[in-house]
Image (spheres, helix red, strand yellow):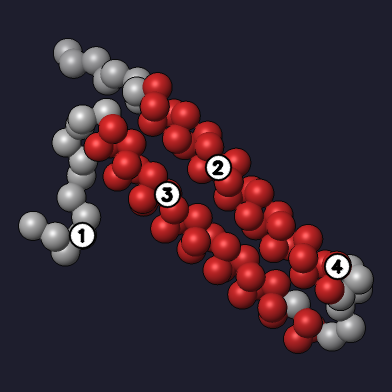
């Protein structure tokens, strides 16, 4: 029977760091939106910018995560998984 080895230390550190970055960036977007509307949006349409800020923040963190993953693989001299669409 084959044992599954735990994730390498650098991978766990990367995941924790990116989770913290995600919480920080999304929290900052929510805080910025809240201070703009003084935490009391007047209509339902005032909530939609919050959705856009959150979506943009999440996509930005995904972009940073992909770059950090490629960089950590290269630094550890590992065979990195290929990006979709690249041979």
Tag nearer the camera, 3 or 2: 3
What secondary structure is marked by label 3?
A: helix
**Is the Cβ of the residue at disc 1 closer than 8 Å to that at disc 3?**
no
Residue 13 left/right relative to 72: right
Q: Residues within 10 Å of mark 3 (few under 14, many from 20)?
A: some
Q: CA distance from mark 4 to mark 2?
A: 24 Å
Which residue lies under the disc numbered 1?
84
Disc assigned to residue 35 = 4
Mark found first going from the N terminus, 3 or 2: 2
Which residue lies under the disc numbered 2?
19
Q: CA distance from mark 3 to mark 2?
A: 10 Å
Q: CA distance from mark 4 to mark 1?
A: 40 Å
Q: CA distance from mark 1 to mark 3?
A: 15 Å
Q: Residue at x 55, y 42 (%)?
A: 19
Q: Residues within 10 Å of mark 2 (few under 14, many from 20)?
A: some
Q: Residue at x 45, y 35 (%)?
A: 14
Query: Would you place residue 6 above or below residue 27 in this image?
Result: above
Q: Residues within 10 Å of mark 1 (few under 14, many from 20)?
A: few
Tag nearer the camera, 1 or 3: 3
Mark found first going from the N terminus, 4 or 1: 4
Query: Would you place residue 1 above or below residue 41 in this image?
Result: above
Q: Position of residue 63 (x, y in %)?
A: 42, 58
Which residue lies under the disc numbered 3?
65
């Amino acid at each position: 029977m084959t044992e599954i080895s735990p994730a390498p230390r650098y991978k766990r550190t990367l995941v924790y760091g990116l989770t913290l970055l995600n919480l920080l960036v999304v929290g900052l977007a929510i805080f910025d939106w809240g201070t703009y509307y003084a935490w009391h949006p007047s209509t339902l349409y005032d909530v939609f910018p919050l959705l856009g800020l959150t979506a943009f923040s999440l996509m930005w963190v995904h972009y940073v995560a992909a770059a950090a993953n490629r960089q950590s693989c290269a630094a550890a001299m590992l065979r990195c998984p290929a990006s979709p669409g690249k041979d």
